[in-house]
Amino acid sequence: MSFSGNTIRRAIEETWDTISLKNEAPSPIIFFARMGDLARSNSFLWAEAGLKVQERRSRNTQRGQALSRTLVLGTVAADIFAGYTTLRERARWWPDFVRARDWNLQHQRGANRILDTASSLGGALIKACQFASTRPDLLPPVYIRSLSRLQDRLPPHPWPEIEAAIIRELGRNPYEVFASIDQEPIAAASIAQVHHAQLRDGREVAIKVQYPEVAGLISADLTVLERISAAIARVAPTVQLQPIVDYLKGTLPLELDFKHEASSMMALRTAFQHRTDILIPEVFTEWNTERMIIMEYVAGIKITNRDALVNAGISPNEVAKLLNDLYAEQMLHLKFLHGDPHPGNLLVQPGPRIVLLDHGLSVPLKDSLVQALSKLVQGIVAGDMDAITAALAEAGLKFNKQVDVATLLQLVGVLLGEEHSTNFMKVGTNLSASMGSIPLDLLLVGRALGLLDGITRQLDPDLEAMELVANYV
């Protein structure tokens, strides 16, 4: 859908939300106040749409793109900031004219703005939304529901742009190295895309090449997001953006450094060389740079494609068991983490054998964290709340106050993957009040385990994964 189409659709949706009173019968003053909020919000919406058009044009000309992105983000932030400020001041001076539904409408508008902008601009914003959607302690539930719809599968960049990037990284004509390169990508995401190719000696490879200028754009995005988070925190304490910015500042440099990714692939491939039921593609180091990786091309079935697994004679139950076993050994024995087990990064071959792709967030784990995770698993299996609390503290999690058992269990669920529980949308306030900051390495583990939990539930919802993990402690 075009930017103008998105704008019209969003304006219609928000107008209907505002005038659709359902069972509520507000006074005329409240009604007209809401209509005034809608008029202000829609004026921002049209301004944002125009700036997004300009940002899209700047991508084609490669001129002024950082500035145009900053203007878009700044306008979106001003829109959200104005909405919360207006409600806060209205509640301060005329408390009878602000109801719970007004805050819910503002939350929905804010979530809509962020979702549309991330879909349009990509880059750091896609990563921010994906991470934010797993953190009910940072954002109101409506943000979690909206942002969780954002997928990392994006429209690919045009082939001439990618070909130019490959030439730049190789420093020569790519057909001196490759016999052929498929112009249609096999994967496209927010930072890079992957193309199938064949070396001149006949070996099949995958070329992962970073989008031109993406590092500079992400740096600009992070600077603007940091300023926005500080402004929003002053008027809407329930919207906590700074931990999201901190997470991105810690992880995006890893994902942008393809030499780091290649090194991580080789390290994990070596660590798992004693097993034949896992495959990590071989890296061709002679052609790798900070913005391009040439690796062995590996085919397989997407791990969540249950029907395809069954049709290939592969048991989904066995795949689920193998997946959890591999990650338990990886973290608790090998002290390493493939930090992005997104379904698109996990393939299955007959055996079964699991293929691990995309190692931008693959990192070694500190001994202290591994020991804490082992104690946490033991505490969970034994149902020992004191042991669980002590293990989380040892992992670096600070508590703002004495945490009760219910909140502790909710915390463990959020960190260790139980994000699908029925209470997920209700735990945010308790967690936010009980927890301090969460260390980056623990966040990476928690995010990975959350993704694993979702995959396991699709493959075998009855599998007791914790029993498998307990074998490694």
Image (tube, helix red, strand yellow):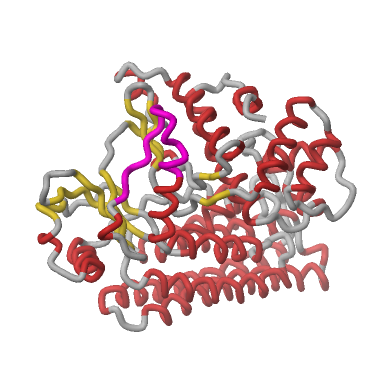
Q: Residue 238, relative to residue 197: is it above or below?
A: below
Residue 34, percent from left and from top = 65, 64
Q: Is residue 444 left or right of residue 70?
A: right
**Stretch in magenta:** 268-283
Q: Nearer the viewer, residue 84 or 393?
A: 393
Secondary structure that dominates the magenta span: loop
Residue at left 30%, top 49%?
187
The reply to whether residue 440 is in sight is yes
Q: Nearer the viewer, residue 406 or 115?
A: 406
Q: Nearer the viewer, residue 346 or 153?
A: 346
Q: Is residue 281 magenta?
A: yes
Residue at left 15%, top 50%?
199
Q: Is residue 118 magenta?
A: no
Residue at left 12%, top 44%?
202
Q: Residue 253, relative to residue 194: is it above or below?
A: below
Q: Is residue 235 left or right of residue 49?
A: right
The reply to whether residue 407 is in sight is no
Residue 412, percent from left and from top = 72, 39
Q: Is residue 3 left or right of residue 360?
A: left
Residue 160, percent from left and from top = 17, 66
Q: Residue 132, relative to residue 68: is it above or below?
A: above
Q: Quadrant of the N terminus?
A: bottom left
Q: Quadrant of residue 97?
A: bottom right
Residue at left 54%, top 29%?
324
Q: Quadrant of the C terminus?
A: top right
Q: How many marks?
A: 0
Residue 150, percent from left and from top = 46, 51
Q: Is residue 26 left or right of residue 80?
A: right
Q: Quadrant of residue 421?
A: top right
